[in-house]
Amino acid sequence: MKIAIGCDHGGINLKPVLTDYLTKKCVEFKDFGTFTKDSCDYNDYAEQVAEAVASGEYDYGILICGTGIGMSIAANKVKGIRCAHCHDVFSAKMTRLHNDANVLAMGERVIGPGLMLLIVDAFLNTEFSGDERHVRRVNKIKALEEKNFK
Ligand code: RB5
């Protein structure tokens, strides 16, 4: 499993908790930045991570900003990305089971490190159900992309 990771200055304190955790779990990842506490635009990191996942080079993306909102909005503008903004374990599990989400966005100003790692665990360790109704709904999302994305 290969994970693409990104944050802005609003997520810079949680990101090392995440990367230490993935390292301990022997999960391969690439950190696309940011690497300093200087103010920056979440869009730039969401874009890199989302494109890395959409290209197929990475299985999943994980994005952290202050709220997780800007990151999720931006990531979902990349064709092929289903970014879920989750601050609880149930949603993280269900978005994999039902939506086949491929990017997870969280907010450092909303949750702490312990909950973040439980959310990440649920997201990375849950497979898409593959149930016909969920496949149909995901396919409708893809059709909507085809209609609206150039
Ligand atoms: C940065 O101050 C903050 O706006 C950003 O991290 C994020 O929360 C945006 O949605």
Image (tube, grey):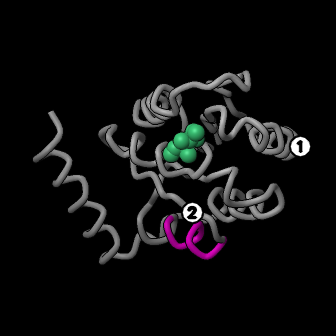
132 or 148: which is nearer to us?
Answer: 148
N-terminal of the pair, mark 2 or mark 1, is: 1
Above or below, 57 relative to 94 = above
Q: What residue is shown with label 1? A: 24
The percent coordinates of residue 4 (x first, y second) are 60, 34
Which sits in the foreground, 121 or 136?
A: 121
**Residue 114 screen position, x and y as percent:** 83, 61
Confirm if mark 1 falls within 8 A of ligand 1: no
| 133 lies left or right of 3 | left
Pick the front one: 70 or 133: 70
**Gap in angstroms between the C-alphas marked 2 and 1:** 23 Å
Q: How many residues crowd around disc 2 within 10 Å: few (fewer than 14), some, or many (20 or more)?
A: many
Residue stretch rendered in magenta on the structure: 89-95
Identify residue type, mark 1. Answer: Lys
List x then y, in percent, for residue 104. 55, 52
Task: Label the magenta part by its dominant secondary structure.
Answer: helix
Quarter of the rendered image showing ligand 1: top right
Q: Is residue 114 visible?
A: yes
Q: Which mark is residue 86?
A: 2
| Occupied quadrant, residue 135 | bottom left
